[in-house]
Image (cartoon, rainbow, N blue to C red):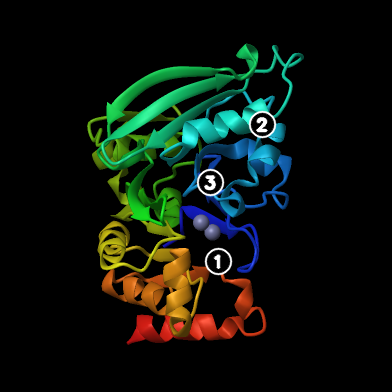
Amino acid sequence: MKPSFHTRLLNGPFEDPGLYIRLLWEGRALMFDLGHTNSLSPRDILKITDIFVSHTHVDHFIGFDNVLRISLKKEGPLRLYGPEGFIDHVEGKLRGYTWNLTKEYPLVINVYEVTEGYIEHAVFKAGNRFRREPMDKRPSNGILLHDSFCKVSVRILDHQIPCLAFSLEEECHININKEMLTNMGLPVGSWLSELKEAIRGNKFNAVITVEGRALSFSDLRAVVDISHGQKLSYVVDALGSEENIKKTVELVKGSDLLYIETYFLESDKEKAMERYHLTAREAGRIARAAGVGRMEPLHFSLRYSDDPEALLREAEEEFRK
Ligand SMILES: [Zn+2]
Ligand SMILES: [Zn+2]
């Protein structure tokens, strides 16, 4: 199966975390966390539509300024999601600069603050000197983004402060059978995106026009292989409490790929508890309990800079148990 999510960790495991996810066929990208973003090209940054920030400890949010700088001339939407207090934090960043000459810039930043019961929305527009404009507050159903292509779900974990964990799921995975296209004498073209869109929207009575021929879904059924969509999850900075572990397992269940912090070794459990982080063994346990396909450990404490393998080994051993 050709993956629809193309992922790239922006920094090494001892550096600040940031995961860039290009949505193939969609021409856009998402991000989980905003550690240093300097390795992204302006082109990469302009593709980003949605940024999910686990929490605003500096190592997870320091890359915001660079994204802001490049996005000033961005026409399309930019949405940011974060935990309790997030709108204040974004506002604080924006207030750090002077905005008298940016009135003509099109950038509009939508910020969503996620708490147990509600999602609060505020807007900051370049045209309005990035002054905070409060919008609506709606009850939260644990889903932050849901369109015809994918869905992002969230759980709030305990990191002494609320910290968000995320799951990204593709609605369904559609592969085009090129051989069948050739056999049926059909050209490659934008009608294929139309067909995919119709399938994702369950519009099976849609009629698709291909070079003047009106074709129904049943005419075209043979050119598509439809399978279960991909799921990937991102979990960082959480205390290894039973409650956090249970919530995380529920969220990441069945993920094809799980990015998860392995900040401490189990032998430093006391430190892990003081700092509200997972140990590598706990990360492995979550991955195993959730039946994930593959686990990608990240976010290592510098105390293991001489032996990062120890973290990987501990997590992997617990995962494969
Ligand atoms: Zn943190
Ligand atoms: Zn952190």
Dot in front, 1 or 3: 3
Instruction: Give x and y (percent) for residue 82.
Output: 45, 41
Circle 3 packing at 10 Å, graded few (<14), some (14-19), many (20+), is many
- What residue did someone put label 1 on? 299
Whole-Å distance between the Cαs marked 1 and 3? 15 Å
Circle 1 packing at 10 Å, graded few (<14), some (14-19), many (20+), is many
Whole-Å distance between the Cαs marked 2 and 3? 20 Å
Q: Is residue 46 above or below residue 224?
A: above
- Describe the element under mark 3 as helix, strand or loop: loop
- Describe the element under mark 1 as helix, strand or loop: loop
Q: Is residue 134 left or right of residue 93?
A: left
Instruction: Give x and y (percent) for residue 40.
Output: 69, 48
The residue lying at 33 percent from left, 39 percent from top is 115
- What residue did someone put label 2 on? 71
The residue lying at 57 percent from left, 51 percent from top is 60
The amino acid type of the residue labelled 1 equals His
Can the viewer see residue 295 in this picture? no
Would the CB of label 1 be found within 8 Å of ligand 2? yes
The residue lying at 46 percent from left, 23 percent from top is 122
Dot in front, 2 or 3: 3
Q: Is residue 174 left or right of residue 290?
A: right
For residue 140, the mark is: none
Among numbered discs 2 and 1, the one appearing first in the sequence: 2
The amino acid type of the residue labelled 3 equals Thr
- What residue did someone put label 3 on? 56
Among numbered discs 2 and 3, the one appearing first in the sequence: 3
